[in-house]
Amino acid sequence: MPILEVSGLCAGYGASDVLHDVSFSVEQGGITTILGANGAGKTTVLRALCGMLRSARGSIVLDQVQVNGKATESIVRLGVGHVPDGRGTFMNLTTEENLRVGAMTRRDKAAVAADFERVFSYFPRLKERRHQQAGTLSGGEQQMLAISRALMLNPRLLLLDEPSFGLAPLVVQDIFRIMRTINEVQKVAILLVEQNASLALDLASTAYILETGRVVMSGPAHELREAESVRKSYLGY
Amino acid sequence: MEAFLHQVFSGLANGAIYASLALALVMIYQSTHHINFAQGELAMFSTYLAWAMINAGLPYWAAFGLTVVASFFIGLIIERAIVRRVADAPVLTVVVVFIALLVILNSVTGWIFTYTIKVFPSPFPEEPLFGPYISSHEAGVVGVSIFVLVTLFLFFRFTPLGLAMRATAENAVSSRLAGIRTGWMLALGWGIAAAIGAIAGMMVAPIVYLDPNMMSGILLYAIAAALMGGIDSPLGAVIGGLTVGVLENIMGAYVVGTELKLTVALVVIIGVLIFKPTGLFGRSFVTRV
């Protein structure tokens, strides 16, 4: 039973569509990745899922609940943590306040306190910079903060928009290692949208390839890794 | 010297009122990036509500409290019914809407209550209790303003709702992705701004007398104060308000004369916009990419 089932999704900005009849699913507790080059429509997929595009048509079912047409905040409250394109940092708030905003919808104080400790154990850098203005964090730290903010929501499904973008390779490895931990320990399902195909295919169990707004290939990640066309276009060997 | 000190203290009292109204402007500016030109007329309308309640026999502080609550809901309703609909409209549309609100509130008030100048009571005693330089009303105004400012500071700094409102003002998209109902946060901001304005109106009315145009000058001082502090800085608005209040009084008493007092505010507005558009406390963003 998939936690997220998308079928026939069309969406775009203004008059023209970016996505054409996109279908995919994320298994309960699984990791799915959507790969694609710049401009393929990856970010648009995530925005459509979270009700950020009025133009979105098609069916989006989150754990048996139809979420099309719902407001972003209502979809999020169903347990969807979205780490957005550009990281969405609250620059003028402190690191800790950013995390408290992430936990805003929750009433279980003890569990929130435990989650604070948990994200600080994933990312000790954030604990060190707890009282620092978030706008002064480095790009990597802001990415860690964005992931942590989404985790503070206690999500069932985590949507990640190119978490590797613009970061040093070591930081990227760190972040991908922690995403695996989050998935294994917290049983959070992950939908990862990436340009870095090699890393994404290592992490995910299922993969889809998006080209100019259409799914052109899909299957188990290890099979796609072997496919010659994927190797040539996305892995570069 | 005594006369000078008196000018300073009464300047501070006026300045506290400008500071409150400037703070209301800053609150709206932070979330909408527009100056609400109708903020002063909203405050004036609220003050008439208080006047009507007091005239109907309510004790002063009961009328005061009811007015603050009523103003909160008026602000909330204006946001939900009108401002929301032009949220994505071009700047000029929003400016026109705000100016229309100003004119409508002004003329509706005049129509209901007439344009005759009315006396509005002060809740503070006649005789000066705090020495020769400051009247009891002026001291009371300063006290009430400090109370309002401290309450707001505590609310925004230490409550989850305050944090949600700050988050919404800064980044509405990220706030929605954290599950915050940003529409309500904006409406709440308008409500609080209108409530602050109502207090400022009730505090200034005993000094300038109640009439439908009583806030037009005050709003200019408040805009000058908000700009001087940096239009997106609450602390700047408060310091700007006090500075403009004292400056206005001293310039009026010793330099330009009372007729040109309001001109001081306009000179400050133009001066800040030309020489230091970010104001004294305006943010030059500290960000790394």
Image (cartoon, coloured by chain):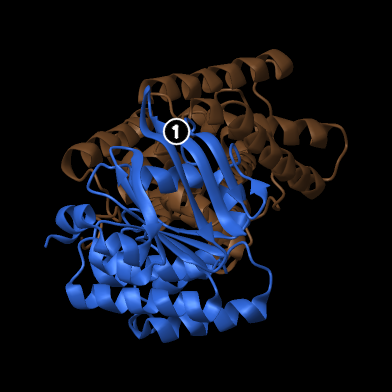
Chain colours: A blue, B brown
Is B28 located above or below residue A233 in the figure? above
Place residue A155 in its image quadrant: bottom right
Location of residue A206 in the rendering, given as x and y in whole percent from the top left corner: 41, 61
Residue ID at (34%, 79%):
A177
Residue type at numbered disc 1: Cys
Location of residue B2 in the rendering, given as x and y in whole percent from the top left corner: 42, 57
Question: Left or right: where does residue B53 sit relative to residue A60?
Answer: right
Location of residue A154 in the rendering, given as x and y in whole percent from the top left corner: 57, 69
Question: Left or right: where does residue A166 sit relative to residue A79?
Answer: left
**Quadrant showing the C terminus of chain A:** bottom left
Residue ID at (39%, 65%):
A146
Out of B55 and A64, give the one closest to the viewer.
Answer: A64
Q: Which residue is mark 1?
A: A10
Location of residue A17 in the rendering, given as x and y in whole percent from the top left corner: 37, 29
Q: Chain of mark 1?
A: A
Is A10 located above or below residue A161 in the figure? above
Which secondary structure lies at badge 1? Answer: strand
Whether residue A91 is visible, yes or no, is: yes
Place residue B161 in its image quadrant: bottom right
Out of A9 and A104, give the one closest to the viewer.
Answer: A9
Whether residue B21 is visible, yes or no, is: no
Residue ID at (36%, 85%):
A124
Numbered disc total: 1
Outermost residue toward the right in this view: B57
Out of A90 and B214, give the one closest to the viewer.
Answer: A90
Out of B141 and A69, give the one closest to the viewer.
Answer: A69
Classify mark 1: residues with Cα within 10 Å, few (<14), some (14-19) or many (20+): many
**Quadrant showing the N terminus of chain A:** bottom right
Residue ID at (63%, 36%):
B75
Is B262 located above or below residue A47 in the figure? above
Place residue A135 in its image quadrant: bottom left
